[in-house]
Image: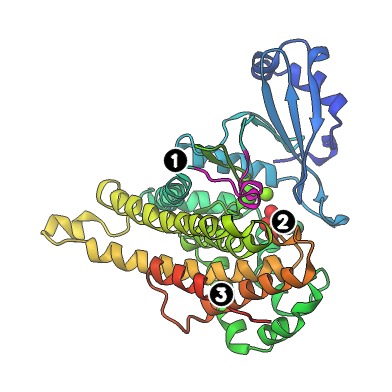
Amino acid sequence: MNTPDLYRPLTPEELGPRLSAVPVIAGRVGADPSLWTVKEVGDGNLNLVFIVEGPQGTVIVKQALPYVRLVGDSWPLPLYRAYYENHALVRQAARDPGSVPEVYHFDEAQALIVMEFLSPHKILRRKLIDGEKVAGLGAFLGRFCARTAFRGSELSLKSADKKKDVGLFAGNVEIPAITEALIFTDPYYDAKMNHHTPGLDPVVAELRGNPALKARVQRMLMKFASNTETMLHGDLHSGSIMSTETESKVIDPEFVQYGPMGFDIGMLVANFLMAYFSQPAHRDTDDLAPYQDWILSVIDEVFSSFETEFRTLWESERTGMLFPAALFEDQNQSSRDCCDDLLADIRSDALGFCGIEMHRRTLSLAHNADFEEIEDIALKCRLEARNLAMGAELILGTQAVNTTASLLDLARQFNAKDIL
Ligand code: SR1
Ligand code: MG
């Protein structure tokens, strides 16, 4: 594990000499660090990120800071999260080859990961705000969620291996604690670091004044904290995806933990829905409807590709202790209904997590650029109110949303509603 006394946040000037001594990095970037350019480009909530460019190539260096960058050193955060992120990247690469950046080097003492520089990829959230499309996006993400969910669970892994892995990742305690507070708890009371657009007060008061909603959220938190079905990415939003026009990669799994299978897909869909609801502020009238339709088509693809891939893996890779062939196929009984039931449960969990993520991004500490970049505050308020109201509907489940078509329909209904 980390030796914190050796650690210090590195400057761009220090990185060259340090990394050129690592043969695998010198081989990728060039042997002479005086010919390298190193820029710190991190704009996320937690870490330093450097682009290191040399005559032979470019790499990305991500170094954990001992505190939350978004807040400052008043909120310390353990460096060991880089250790777990490295382990998560290795597992994701094995479970869905090509889906994540390749790791070239991990320096545990410096909490530093050197990895593949993705170019000309852009952060997906930026592309969604800018109205850019990505071919195959939903299919890729649905497959990623299915492969990591299935192959990280006891449907596939040997039970002893999975339990050992749960033990390993259980050490990443402060990171899930962020999610437990910022996502599941803070939005529903007047927590210290919260902020929201002032005009939203009546909608916020309604949410916080609804014990049934808070009870549902707490049940979802219980699942999140206590259910170790599979290894999650843990923070799968559109800022954790980088895309070109035709290719996407998933980055930043430092929120990795074992948790319920529906969590990643629920977070992901929430971020597409928020992109959808924010579009009237980012598009001209002519482009608006077609682009919003495209976002909904991505959600549709995410679910269908998730379910298709999950079913394929169910048929071909069910090698763990769960639903063994000995109980079904070997006795000439189909297990297809078991798979359908499990998928229905995953979808139902996903929609609950989705609604909660939609709430936290407008009420808690960490908001998203989709809404934050809207300068017209009255418009921002109207769009955020639609997002909050749909989130509540998904959490409470008063309307049956058991197909993707009904989910997309619900989004269209809220997109046309004047909540405020
Ligand atoms: C204090 S960290 C805030 C948020 O940033 C990360 O990307 C996670 O989404 C976390 O909830
Ligand atoms: Mg991140």
Q: Is residue 385 above or below residue 63?
A: below
Location of residue 418 in the rendering, given as x and y in whole percent from the top left corner = 63, 80
Is 230 placed left or right of 187 in the picture? left
Residue 96's tag is 1
Residue 332 located within the stretch drawn in magenta: no
Q: How is the image coloured?
A: rainbow
CA distance for labels 3 and 2: 22 Å
Q: Residues within 10 Å of mark 1 (few under 14, many from 20)?
A: some
Residue, far left: 332
Any part of residue 196 in sight: no
- Nearer the observer: mark 2 or 1; the answer is 2
Residue 416's tag is 3
Q: Taking the image as four quarters, which one is ligand 1 found in?
A: bottom right
Q: Is residue 212 above or below residue 142?
A: below
Q: Which numbered disc, 3 or 2, marks the residue that appears first in the sequence?
A: 2
Mark 1 lies within 8 Å of ligand 2 (Cβ measured): no
Determine the image quadrant of residue 27.
top right
Name which residue type carries label 3. Answer: Ala
* Residue depicted at x 71% and y 68%: 362
Residue 204's tag is none
Give the magenta-colored segment's residue range: 122-134
Dot 1 falls on a residue whose secondary structure is: loop
Q: Residues within 10 Å of mark 2 (few under 14, many from 20)?
A: some
Is 124 placed left or right of 349 in the picture? right
* Residue depicted at x 82% and y 18%: 17
Q: Is residue 245 above or below residue 253?
A: above
Marks 1 & 3, CB-CB < 8 Å contact: no
Residue 124 located within the stretch drawn in magenta: yes
Q: Which residue is mark 2?
A: 369
Name which residue type carries label 1. Answer: Asp
